[in-house]
């Protein structure tokens, strides 16, 4: 892995930025010249391989790092202290992000700027897609009592959970109890098991480092193919859509920027010894991979590697805080859900009173926790928020066309939040190593 002191062109984040910019240029060129076929045959596969390599590493990494992380804590009191702190900061930052989202959307009122005719056309265009998302949301919330989210965390069969990256929270749970079991039973036999998990963990971290050499090409390919698939050989259509939904996109983007600038950077500046510049340079590759994959789950291996190697977060803290964060801490998603819900209500001419806005805060908090760390998960949970405040969920048809772009940005925000909290928890536990200071 390239380090900060090598020449800039050898530093990973600059290489990834180059991949991103070139991918953007190529994507626009391909969309305008109708190179869709060539792109999907010869460019997309490299992005898919990169994405699959990251996804492939995610579950083994969560399992081995969390088991060794918990088992090395050697006492349950410490585990509950770090756990309590982590969850409290996650919930607090998410609540702040929703509030920022609500303030921005209520002040900008992007829904008032959409001509009625355009709103109707959009809803008709995306009717089929809307129904798909609605039925996915219905399935997710079907026959659900108030404690169902808790029940969902506990799997009946671990191998079933490990078959899909969507079940990361179940894997986190299994790893936690395995780690606790290892703390409780310390014999020469269990020492072997601990050693096995630790060894496996070291191997995966090394492999992720190697996979990251492919990141610039992977990011180039992912961005290029996203642009081509969104534009579908008709750039004008994308431009029209962006014109109509420009203010809505602007509200989401402004909210995300404010959250990152006001909340994360102040937390790092005032509550950790880490230099802001060092923090930002360290996490740039994480943000770029999140931006191009739209998945916090797929980005997790990179998040862990950078937090440990570049920010100096101890293995003990990062292996607990980050897998948990990738699945439950989604500030960007929560902010986006709040803006989108109010935007749809505004477009449909429905006023939302204070109770409805407070309902948004609560449901967006829960919905962001429940959103899987995969592309497009946030908009499925948005259906549940809309139903909670009595806004017709067909309204998501209005925003589906630009969802992918916003997904990229909210995922980058989500992972920034995870890294911030990892640094804070590590520094409060005196577990921020030299590597991060300076
Ligand atoms: N793609 C987001 C993530 O993985 C979730 C979402 O908002 O759709 O963090």
Image (cartoon, rainbow, N blue to C red):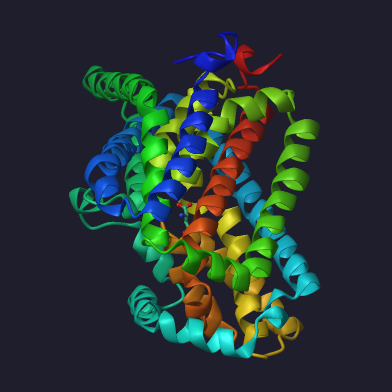
- Residue 207, how many percent across, how many down? 31, 22
Camera-nearest residue between 348 and 204:
348
Residue 381 horizontal side relative to residue 196, left or right? right
- Residue 323, how many percent across, how many down? 44, 41
Q: Is residue 429 visible?
A: no
Q: Using the image, determine if residue 246 lies above or below residue 112.
A: above
State the quadrant of the N terminus.
top left
Q: Using the image, determine if residue 404 lies above or below residue 15.
A: below
Count numbered badges in the picture: 0
Camera-nearest residue between 402 and 271:
402
Q: Quadrant of residue 108?
A: bottom right
The residue depicted at 43 percent of the width and 47 percent of the height is 29
Residue 285 horizontal side relative to residue 273, left or right? left
The residue depicted at 38 percent of the width and 52 percent of the height is 33
The residue depicted at 47 percent of the width and 71 percent of the height is 400
Residue 192 horizontal side relative to residue 82, left or right? left
- Residue 99, how many percent across, how many down? 73, 64
The residue depicted at 29 percent of the width and 46 percent of the height is 39
State the quadrant of the C terminus.
top right
Q: Is residue 203 visible?
A: yes
Q: Residue extending furthest front? A: 33
Camera-nearest residue between 295 and 124:
124
Q: Using the image, determine if residue 169 lies above or below residue 112.
A: above
Q: Quadrant of residue 127?
A: bottom left
Camera-nearest residue between 226 and 372:
226
- Residue 299, how many percent across, how many down? 43, 39
Q: Using the image, determine if residue 48 lies above or below residue 133.
A: above
């Amino acid at each position: 892995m390239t380090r900060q002191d090598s020449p800039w062109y050898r530093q990973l984040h600059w290489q990834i930025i180059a991949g991103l910019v070139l991918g953007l240029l190529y994507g626009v060129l391909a969309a305008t010249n109708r190179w869709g076929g060539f792109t999907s045959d010869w460019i997309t596969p490299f992005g898919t391989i990169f994405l699959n390599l990251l996804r492939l590493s995610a579950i083994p990494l969560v399992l081995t790092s969390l088991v060794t992380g918990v088992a090395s804590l050697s006492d349950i009191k410490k585990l509950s202290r770090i756990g309590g702190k982590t969850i409290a900061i996650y919930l607090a930052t998410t609540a702040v992000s929703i509030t920022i989202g609500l303030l921005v959307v209520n002040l900008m009122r992007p829904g008032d700027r959409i001509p009625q005719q355009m709103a109707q056309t959009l809803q008709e265009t995306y009717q089929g897609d809307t129904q798909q998302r609605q039925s996915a949301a219905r399935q997710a919330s079907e026959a659900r009592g108030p404690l169902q989210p808790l029940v969902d965390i506990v799997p009946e069969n671990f191998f079933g959970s490990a078959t899909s990256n969507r079940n990361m929270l179940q894997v986190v749970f299994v790893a936690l109890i395995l780690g606790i079991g290892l703390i409780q039973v310390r014999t020469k036999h269990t020492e072997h098991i601990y050693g096995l998990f630790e060894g496996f963990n070291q191997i995966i971290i090394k492999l992720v480092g190697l996979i990251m050499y492919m990141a610039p090409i992977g990011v180039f390919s992912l961005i290029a193919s996203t642009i081509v698939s969104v534009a579908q050989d008709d750039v004008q259509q994308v431009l029209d859509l962006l014109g109509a939904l420009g203010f809505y996109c602007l509200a989401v983007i402004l909210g995300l920027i404010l959250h990152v600038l006001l909340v994360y950077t102040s937390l790092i500046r005032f509550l950790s010894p880490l230099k802001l510049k060092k923090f930002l340079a360290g996490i740039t590759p994480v943000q770029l991979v999140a931006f191009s994959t739209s998945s916090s789950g797929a980005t997790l291996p990179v998040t862990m590697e950078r937090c440990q190697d570049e920010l100096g977060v101890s293995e003990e803290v990062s292996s607990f805080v980050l897998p948990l964060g990738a699945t439950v801490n989604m500030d960007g998603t929560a902010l986006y859900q709040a803006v989108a819900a109010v935007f749809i209500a505004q477009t449909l001419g429905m006023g939302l009173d204070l109770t409805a806005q407070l309902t948004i805060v609560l449901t967006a908090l829960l919905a962001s926790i429940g959103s899987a760390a995969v592309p497009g998960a946030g908009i499925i949970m948005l259906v549940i928020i809309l139903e909670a405040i009595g806004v017709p969920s067909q309204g998501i048809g209005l925003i589906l066309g630009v969802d992918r772009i916003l997904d990229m940005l909210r995922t980058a925000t989500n992972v920034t939040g995870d890294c911030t909290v990892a640094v804070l928890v590590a520094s409060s536990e005196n577990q921020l190593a030299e590597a991060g200071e300076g």
